[in-house]
Amino acid sequence: MTPEHAVNLQPLNSFGIAARAHTLVRVRSAEDVRAVLADPVLAASPVFILGGGSNIVLTGDVKALVLKVEVPGRRVLDATTRHWLVEAGAGEPWADFVRWTLDQGLPGLENLALIPGTVGAAPVQNIGAYGVELQDRFHSLDAIDLRTGQEFTLDAAQCGFGYRDSVFKHASDLGLAGRALILRVRFALPRPWRPELGYLDLQRKVEETGIAAPDAQQIHDWVCAIRRAKLPDPAVIGNAGSFFKNPTVSPEQCADIIARDPAVVHYPLADGRIKLAAGWLIDACGWRGKTVGHAGVYEKQALVLVNRGDAEHPCTGGEVMTLARAIQTSVYERFGIRLEPEPVVV
């Protein structure tokens, strides 16, 4: 464990926002965390946990101690009649891990292909895409208490999963935000496997290709193609992926919106509520392709905010949040809906 100082965070966040960490420690094992806790200066500092940096907006230099999670490892643990049990270190890139499971002949994560970020961040956000959420495949995780250095294990119920939510996003008495760091995550991949094709874009792929019974690799490739067509590559255009959560409303609220805007994109949920497409709402308010300062709305997908800056005039977190607040105001004034950002604002 070697602390690094004045670390440039621009290459460590997918939005490409220029900022620095006063002090950064790379965590490759539980022992690295315990070494931090044994250092009186580092142990006294507030902490900020950084994974792949794909879901954050930096609004300035980070004064808290940055714990950069780089725990490695991938392995198959067990096989039962119902599941394959696989494990990955929290620092493993998520998209690489998904490809690895398929290479091992273990389907189940293919709908979650190409999502940026790390394995450790996946349960924090309860990532989801194309009809599957992480909680559908989750088994358990190992984490370490940032106060005591003790390791502990959580199952799905203890993680408190919700829509893009978990116990790791809350700082209340029962929350673990800033109090624990995820080390390893385990997944239960279903046996026998069956394809999840309920999402509209995947249904279209079935119709376009005539492949009625795609295998997991085919679904993975379809999902990658769909994502690449809609979302910019952070290596080319800085972004944090989908910037706003899809809001949920009551059937009565949805009916009211449909009466005024019949084309609104909406999906019924199992609990009777209706999920609205945030990208459609933003697009309907005329934001697609618009720019505020050096932050813009992606022209191919209004749900994505992008970095329009360059080396001489980098995009700032303040510009991103100014644009985000303007979008929130527009959507609320037209639809009466408050959009909630997905990324963590630091």
Image (spheres, helix red, strand yellow):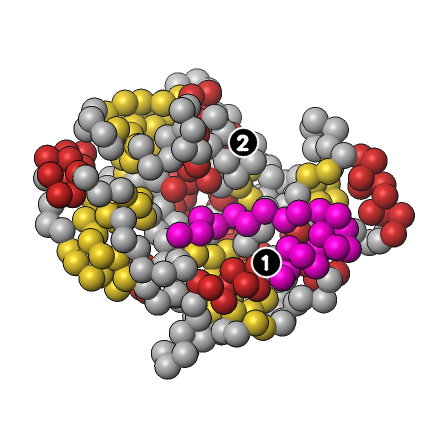
Q: Inspect the image, locate mark 1, and give the three-letter code of the amino acid beneath it.
A: Arg
Residue 303 picture location, percent across and down = 60, 57
Q: Inspect the image, locate mark 2, and give the three-letter code of the amino acid beneath it.
A: Gly
Say if residue 60 shows up in the picture: yes
Question: What residue sits right under mark 1 in the picture?
Answer: 325
* Residue 275 picture quarter: top right
In the picture, the disc for residue 229 is none
Outermost residue on the top side: it is: 81
Nearer-the-camera pick, 13 or 83? 13
| Element at label 2 | loop
Earlier sequence position, callout 2 versus callout 1: 2
Count how many numbered circles sit on residues in the image.
Answer: 2
Residue 329 covered by magenta stretch: yes
Residue 217 picture location, percent across and down = 48, 46
Q: Which residues are magenta?
A: 325-346
The quadrant of the image that shows the N terminus is top left
Crowding near pointer 1: few (<14 within 10 Å), some, many (20+)?
A: some
Say if residue 96 shows up in the picture: no
Q: Residue at x 70, y 59 (%)?
A: 330
Q: Residue at x 58, y 73 (%)?
A: 291
Q: Residue at x 68, y 39 (%)?
A: 248
Residue 243 covered by magenta stretch: no
Question: What residue sits right under mark 2 in the picture?
Answer: 162
